[in-house]
Amino acid sequence: RLSLDRLFVQSLRPQDPLTKETYDKFESPSYLNDRAIAERQNLIEQLNYWNSRLGLYIADSVPSLCREDMRGSRVLRILSIIARVWNATTLTGEESSSDKHLDDFSLIVTLATAFINENECSSQAASATASPASTSTMSSSTPFTRPHTQYQNFTFEMGVIPALYMTAIKCRS
């Protein structure tokens, strides 16, 4: 995960000279220099390598992976695809450059759908197996008492939402 985060930061940070050069392209007739193109290509190659390593890990570990690990691997795969698409589309700066990645966008939607459906199934299963006491309303003993229920872990991580947003604005299919 940390190596993917590092690649993501290198790809997306606004002060990145690669990103700045791409946006400057629209303000002047200049074009991306060979160094910037080579660095983007290097990031794409690193992301492809990362993605292949994740695939090997999952293939070797499928029997022993728990549900949460499988869900996490889907999110990681989605993030790696988004980073790869971002790097590939910033090379040209053309709006239509995203059209070459329709298969990637389709895969993102498929993985996100599986992620969301699995989350709904686990929430419904937790609700169905909860005891009446755990789903009852507030206890009358104190106004601040909460009923005993199962809660999802809180996280600041946005999961599949940014990837689905980028897919929605970039995919024209």
Image (spheres, rainbow, N blue to C red):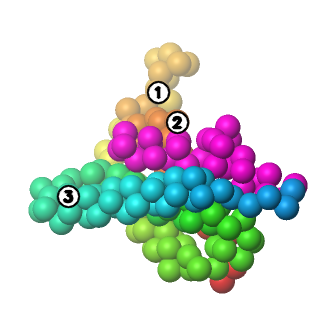
* Residue interval drawn in magenta: 1-27
Indicate the secondary structure of the residue bearing disc 3.
helix
Type of amino acid under label 1: Arg
Q: Nearer the viewer, mark 3 or mark 2?
A: 3
Packing grade of label 1 (10 A; few <14, some 14-19, many >=20) is few
| 51 or 64: nearer the viewer | 51
Q: From what the image shows, is residue 36 above or below residue 95?
A: above
First in residue order: circle 1 vs circle 2: 1
Distance of label 1 from label 3 (alpha carbons): 41 Å
**Mark sitting on residue 156:** 2
Q: Nearer the viewer, mark 1 or mark 3?
A: 3
Q: Residue furthest top?
A: 142
Q: Looking at the image, which residue is at 50% across and 30% down? A: 138
First in residue order: circle 1 vs circle 3: 3
Q: Looking at the image, which residue is at 87% across and 56% down? A: 28
Query: Pointers 1 and 2 in contact (CB under 8 A)?
Result: no
- Residue 171 percent across, percent down from the top left: 65, 74
The residue wearing badge 1 is 146
| Residue 151 visible in the snapshot | no
Packing grade of label 3 (10 A; few <14, some 14-19, many >=20) is few
User: How many marks are shown on the rendered structure?
Assistant: 3
| Residue 130 visible in the snapshot | yes
Distance of label 3 from label 2 (alpha carbons): 26 Å
In the rendered image, which quarter contains the C terminus? bottom right
